[in-house]
């Protein structure tokens, strides 16, 4: 029987892995994230299945190779936590899980945008501090009179665009290679999108040397005063330091993000206070609450999306066993 060690399995996910195991794989479910300290739990397995929160550096891949494991699959889209130099060096195979429920991330991006657009976050903060005054800063536009800018109109970005479009908003999009069949958005150049949008939402992958700090001071300066920025993509695609400064100085009306820098050192952990965060830029950013909302990389965390991730991952393994290649092979 083909044995798979699966890391970062949360309590609510365990019954889903068992229910959806239609290929009868031998599953070794590990609740902890993969690190060098627990990589030995994969010994005796044929493959590992990881998440975006797991370590998969050269040292860990070397240990997996020593255990005779040739298949390192991930149940998310992103593969930036996997050392492909080591993977290629040992002749190992990587597959990912694209196409899981796009509504999951799109809905969170939409909620973050709307929460800041209608000033719900500062208003609820103040009421919980016993201040029920109707402050001038709560005065808002209505979404059907607003323009939304989607940066990266792939599956996720288009799903968010449709949510805004259903409420009557004008939706612009920037894409390196626009899809002429995508009628949910109006494609434009980046400068126009930044200048005209009331909410700018990021849906681009992080590619080192290419998309790092894709939104920085120069881009923020082009945005409307009081515009909202949302990031459910990857922490490094936005210059968090520039965003923090812009929120503090009222250039940006707010920033909603589900991603941070150095996520492997932060997400999934409980700190005594923000002072204990390992990244000073993240800490500085979060001190702008309530005009900065940070969620713990939970965009994917819906029952439908997790079921999709598991099903796609199991299909990858089944295809590999039948044909030698997974359905979603990743080559770097």
Image (spheres, grey):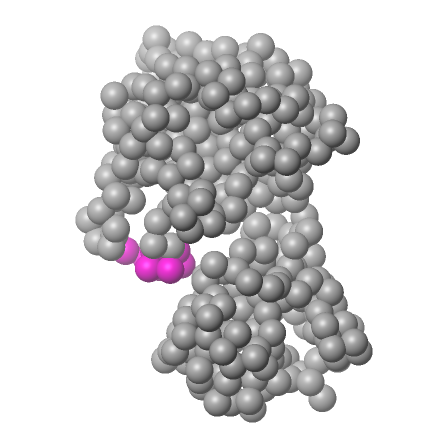
Residue name at image x 33 percent, y 59 percent: 265
Nearest the viewer among 219 and 243 is 219
Asked whether residue 163 appears in the rendered view, the answer is no
Residue 209 percent coordinates (x, y): 40, 48
Residue 27 percent coordinates (x, y): 63, 80
Q: Is residue 245 above or below residue 100?
A: above
Nearest the viewer among 92 and 9 is 92
Asked whether residue 78 appears in the rendered view, the answer is yes
Residue 131 percent coordinates (x, y): 30, 19
Residue 219 found in image quarter: top left
- Image position of 316 (left or right of 176): right
- Image position of 266 (left or right of 9): left
Residue 159 found in image quarter: top right
The quadrant the C terminus occupies is: bottom right
Residue name at image x 47 percent, y 49 percent: 207
Residue 27 counted in the magenta span: no
Residue 218 percent coordinates (x, y): 34, 26
The magenta segment is 264-271
- Image position of 55 (left or right of 171): left
Residue 25 found in image quarter: bottom right
Residue name at image x 74 percent, y 26 percent: 183
């Amino acid at each position: 029987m083909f044995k798979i060690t699966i890391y970062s399995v949360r309590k609510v996910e365990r019954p889903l892995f068992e229910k959806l195991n239609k290929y009868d794989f031998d599953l070794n479910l590990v609740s902890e994230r993969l690190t060098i300290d627990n990589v030995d739990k994969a010994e005796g397995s044929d493959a590992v299945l990881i998440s975006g929160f797991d370590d998969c550096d050269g040292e860990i891949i070397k240990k997996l190779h020593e255990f005779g494991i040739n298949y390192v699959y991930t149940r998310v889209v992103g593969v930036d936590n996997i050392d492909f130099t080591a993977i290629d060096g040992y002749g190992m195979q990587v597959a990912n899980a694209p196409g899981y429920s796009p509504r999951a991330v799109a809905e969170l991006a939409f909620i973050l945008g709307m929460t800041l657009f209608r000033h719900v976050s500062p208003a609820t903060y103040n009421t919980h501090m016993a201040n029920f005054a109707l402050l001038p800063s709560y005065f808002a536009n209505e979404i059907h009179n607003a323009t939304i800018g989607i940066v990266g109109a792939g599956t996720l970005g288009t799903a968010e665009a449709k949510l805004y479009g259903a409420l009557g908003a004008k939706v612009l999009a920037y894409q390196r290679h626009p899809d002429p069949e995508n009628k949910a958005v109006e494609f434009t150049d980046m400068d126009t999108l930044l200048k005209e949008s009331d909410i700018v939402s990021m849906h681009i992958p992080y590619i080192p040397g290419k998309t790092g700090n894709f939104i920085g001071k120069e881009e923020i300066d082009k945005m409307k005063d009081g515009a909202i920025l949302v990031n459910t993509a990857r922490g490094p695609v936005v210059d968090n330091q520039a965003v923090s400064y812009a929120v503090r100085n009222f250039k940006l009306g707010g920033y909603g993000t589900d991603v941070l820098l150095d996520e492997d050192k932060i997400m999934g952990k409980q700190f005594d206070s923000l002072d204990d965060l390992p990244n000073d830029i993240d800490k500085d950013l979060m001190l702008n609450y309530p005009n900065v909302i940070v969620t713990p990389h939970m965009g994917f965390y819906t029952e439908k999306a997790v079921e999709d991730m598991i099903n796609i991952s199991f299909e990858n393994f089944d295809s590999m066993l039948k044909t030698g290649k997974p359905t979603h092979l990743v080559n770097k």
